[in-house]
Amino acid sequence: MQLYHNIENDLVIDVNEIHHRQQVIQQLKKHFRLFGYREIHTSPFEAYDLYVQMNGTVNHEEMIKTIDNTGKALVLRPDITIPLTQQIASHNTSITEDLRYFYVLDVFRQKQGTEAQRYNTQAGIEYFGNPSPEADAEVVFLAIDTLKQMRFKNLKMELGHAGFFARLIDAMQLKEEDLQLLKQYIQAKNIPEIEQFLKRTSLNDDIQEVIMALPFLYGEPQVVLDRASELPLPKDAVPALDSLRAIYDNLKAYGVEKHVVIDLSLINHMDYYSDMIFQGFIENIGKPIVMGGRYDSLAAQFDSNIPASGFAYDLDTLVSHAAITSTETTQDVDVKIMYDGEKQQESVQLATKLRKSDFETVLYPKEHPLVQTPKAHETVYVTASGVKCIDASGEETRYTNAETYEATKEKE
């Protein structure tokens, strides 16, 4: 049950909002299954050591930690990709099969010194075993197509490459604090700060030219890739451009190229991404609603060689902006049975039969203490003199007994 806080900090149960949320979740699950993905779950508690031994993944200060009754340090699940990859890698040094999984799970993180929300729900897919550009294109297409099926318009998917920026980093050999600062400037496309930063460094002219060009390497894929190819790039950065060309060519086959732009300044905060990265936006939302990419190198941290890619939606943002496909205009149940004390057993049996026939049914003695009971399409009174049914319009029908009434419901 989902609870929502109002401004007086009282707990408010909004049944229609819960229903809408479940609609969105079911729509996501159905669409993921259409592409061959199967639902999985991971434990909400994970070993703290799993993240301590890994670099460049989840910020340790944002993890919510606890101790179990044996004294072992645990964290509430801060990520889904990492434990899933670890689980697969623990049984395979490599795989030759195609593994497709999806999930709708909570992840728990809290920025230090804040009272911000401690968890959010992610809905995503993980695709193991296929390193091809065709697989990358299908993953990006699934992220786009799911949003289109949910009737979002003006979709924009920004496609970049983690390896492209990684090769630039290798060529710069910056200190960690300088690197983080430069990343901030690049992500913000803050050209004046980038210029000032480069003036303080001893980077060669070629790499400075490339860094200054990054904020402008955004837009129509073919134009951006051609412009990037003309830059004095490190040789090991060129394959990243070839990879993006191949992915984009495959996306054309799906007919979604109008939704795709290339952004070579795109940087994902999860350093386990090794190749393609992407993030998607919908109209009037200033933050990505979906993020993903290829993380072939993640399994290497568990001594395995397993190619993989995937993405995750921010479910809460998705739900708050998704169109309601079918609104519950009423919370009425199908049948409400009110019975005299001596007719309890007969009424219980009637309710059981109705429920087996998929009728939502509630049951009360006529002299019950509640002031208000749920509204129903039909209210059935079971008394010593027979059975009386009153429908929502107020029309009354009488029956000899409960079995006679139940027989009419079976025909519906």
Image: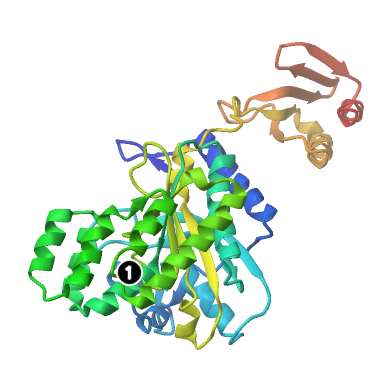
**Mark 1: amino acid:** Phe
Scheme of colours in the image: rainbow
- Give residue 53's quadrant in the image: bottom left
Vertical order, 4 against 177 (above or below): above
Quickly name the residue at label 1.
165
Vertical order, 394 against 239 (above or below): above
Q: What residue lies at 56% left-to-right and 53% top-to-bottom?
A: 251
| Depth order, front residue of 270/335 | 270
Q: Residues within 10 Å of mark 1 (few under 14, many from 20)?
A: many
- Give residue 361's quadrant in the image: top right
Instruction: Give the percent coordinates (x, y) of residue 272.
Output: 41, 73
Vertical order, 401 against 312 (above or below): above
Instruction: Give the percent coordinates (x, y) of residue 82.
Output: 47, 73
**Image quadrant occupied by the C terminus:** top right
The mark tally for this picture is 1
**Helix, strand or loop under label 1:** helix
Instruction: Give the percent coordinates (x, y) of residue 348.
Output: 79, 39
| Depth order, front residue of 161/32 | 161
Q: What residue lies at 69% left-to-right and 26% top-to-bottom?
A: 366
Asked whether, in this view, residue 183 is left or right of residue 136, the answer is left
Q: What residue lies at 90% left-to-right and 28% top-to-bottom?
A: 411
Instruction: Give the percent coordinates (x, y) of residue 8.
Output: 30, 36
Asked whether, in this view, residue 250 is left or right of residue 154, the answer is right
- From where the camera sits, is residue 104 visible? no
- From where the camera sits, is residue 4 visible? yes
Q: What residue lies at 77% left-to-right and 23% top-to-bottom?
A: 381
| Depth order, front residue of 18/264 | 264
